[in-house]
Structure formats: structure tokens, C-alpha cells
Image (tube, rainbow, N blue to C red):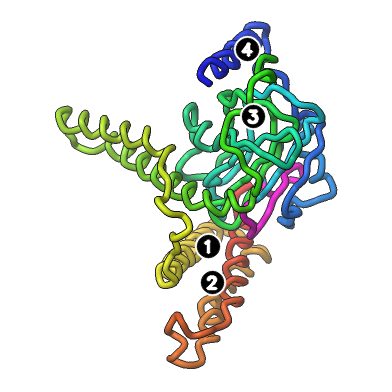
Amino acid sequence: MKRHILLATLTVLAATSRGQESPANLALGKTYQLEPTPDYAHCTDAGDRAQLTDGQYTQGYFWTQKGTVGWAGHSPIIITLDLQNAQPIAGLSYNTAAGVAGVNWPAAIFVLVSDNAEVWHLAGDLVALSAKASRPPESGYAVHRYRTLDLATHGRFLKLLVVPTGAYAFVDEIEVYRGPETLLARPVPGREITDVRAFFARTRIDASLRRRLESDVAAVSESMKTAPLSETVARPLATQLEAIAREIPSVEVASPENFTPGKHMEAIREGIEDFEYLRMLRDRVEALETQGVRNSALASARKLLDTAADRVTACMTSSALIHWKEPKDRTVADRVRVEILESLTQLAEP
């Protein structure tokens, strides 16, 4: 395996020496399938069926551009590319944006390859592979290109299972990079998968857990830069953090079948997230009002701030409903949450 990765890397270096930034893009102009159908209102259009492999990158605020493909409230997002023939694959890239308005970076982007679209092989997690070279920022709006040249695999079909963190997922371009022809003569590496949905159900918890651990390690590392620590204290801590970071890609939940989040903990988590969304909306509204902005989107956001809590709690017609086991209508809370996120998007800076 290491030998094939080395061959792929040498091919990339040779291409770069000839003035090319990347190997040939096998995905350019190729067809693909999207599951589910894109449905984010501000960017969905008829061009979604071709825009991910047209070689064009979005200009401007990412999820309000028609060149972007977006989803709201779905997981996983499945993108299946047909390269038309079995191809040697060195790597790929996935261009997206996040950081504001309730849009977060994906927890994982699982890469699967196949020759017949029936039996698949896991090539890796693009989020983890890309992190070896670069990571998206921890906060603030940014466009980030998840990219790797470490796949060393082959196949005609390439499937991406995108695991969103939160409600939204966006992408405007996918590239697949050609590897050395010698890859075609080798067995396809990676775990064999025949039921993609079952695979996702087993691995999404692991992906979310790894992302949280990576985020925590990055936060601690950043804090250590300004912490008043002596060299004798800081150096061992840094060494421990590096060791933890190396172990994160192999972290797995011991028994995924028996891992069930408690309803009360899920409710607490959702409540905290709802509070954060409302605070983000409040801060944005106050900032725009201070600037003297006056428009219908701002007025709607102010009204939403004033009425959101009452709308959600109106269904609590009896004190007995406070118990989690009592059935209650949660659709209003879900609808208000989506309205808050959409309002944040409308008020985001271009």
C-alpha cells in the first residue's frame, strides 16, 4: 500500500514539474447522481445535475450562488460519480464553505470506489485525509477545499457519503485525480461494502466522535500558544497532544449497535444549540440595527426573536408534558429552528 501511495505522489510531483498544479481531473464533465435531491432554496436550480463537475468554482457568498449545490436537513448526502471506465485514482477534492449562519464543516466525507456500482471498497475519509495538509478555520466564514492525493486505488464509480454537522451541506466542485496506470493491476484496497446505508449507520457516530476530538485537540493547542506555561510544562503537553492526534483516526465506538444517545441528553444538546442560534441571530440583528440597516429581512428577524420561544412553548398545555416520555408535538420547534437558520443566512454579510 505504501508503495502505491509513493508512486501516486511521484506522479503528482512529475506533473507539477511540467507546470501542472494537479494530475488530470478524471471527473471533469462526467455525470453523477445526487441523493437526496438538492433542496436549499437559495442555490438550487436545474444546473445542479452538472455543476459539480463543470470545472467552475463559485464566486461570491457560497450558498446563495446558483453554481453551488445545497441540501437542508438531510444526512447522509450521497454523490455517485461515473468515470465511464475503470480509472487509476490518486486522490480527489471537495470544495465547500461554512462557518456562519448555522452552516458547519462536515463531520466526514467517506470515499468509496467500485467497478460495478454494487460492491464498493472504502478508500478513506476525505476530511481526515485532508487534515494532514490543512484544516478549515475553527470560526468565521471560509471556503475550504478538502483534498488528498493519498488514495492509491482504482474504479469506474466513486461514491461520496457526506456526513453534515448540523442542518446544511454545500459543495460547488468535485475533482478526481488520475493516478499511475500500475494501480489498475492491483486488487482494490479497503474494506468491502455491499450495503452503503448500513455502512453509514455504523460509521457516522465514529465520524462525529473523531471530529469532536480533533476540534478539542486543536482548541487546546491554540490555547497553549498564549497560556503562561514554562517550557518544561508546555513541551510534555504538546507531545501528549500530538500522540492523541495520531490516535484519533483509528478511534471507533466499541459497539455501534448498542450505542444509543439518551433522550434527555439529546434534548439538552438541542436546547443548547437552539440557545446558540438565537444568540447568533440576536447579535446579528443588533449589529445591523446599530449600522442603521432597515429592511424586511431584518424586521422579520426581530419578530422571530420576539416570538420564537412563545411559539415553541405554546404546545405545553399541561405540566405533565414536561416529562420526556409524554408524547408532544415537536414540529413547531423544528420549524422555528429552520426559520432561525434561514434568517441568519439572509442577514449574513455578502
- Residue range in magenta is 63-76
Residue 42 visible, this angle? no
In the image, residue 276 lies at what x, y percent?
A: 46, 62
| Label located before the other in sequence (1 or 3) | 3
Q: Residue beneath label 3, please?
A: 92
Q: Residue beneath label 4, please?
A: 11
Residue 340 visible, this angle? yes
| Label located before the other in sequence (2 or 3) | 3
Given contact means CB atoms under 8 Å apart, are the residues at marks 2 and 3 in contact? no
Q: How many angstroms separate mark 4 from mark 1 (CA)?
A: 49 Å
Q: Quadrant of residue 190?
A: top right
Given contact means CB atoms under 8 Å apart, are the residues at marks 4 and 1 in contact? no
Q: How many angstroms separate mark 4 from mark 3 (CA)?
A: 14 Å
In the image, residue 16 lies at what x, y percent?
A: 63, 11
Q: Nearer the viewer, mark 1 or mark 3?
A: 3
Q: Quadrant of residue 214?
A: top left
Label 1: which secondary element: helix
User: Which residue occupies 35% across, 40% down?
Assistant: 217
| Label located before the other in sequence (4 or 3) | 4
Label 4: which secondary element: helix
Q: How many angstroms separate mark 1 from mark 3 (CA)?
A: 36 Å
50 vs 315: above or below: above
Q: Residue beneath label 2, please?
A: 305
In the image, residue 328 lies at what x, y percent?
A: 54, 83
Q: Residue beneath label 1, please?
A: 281
34 or 293, which is in the foreground?
Answer: 34
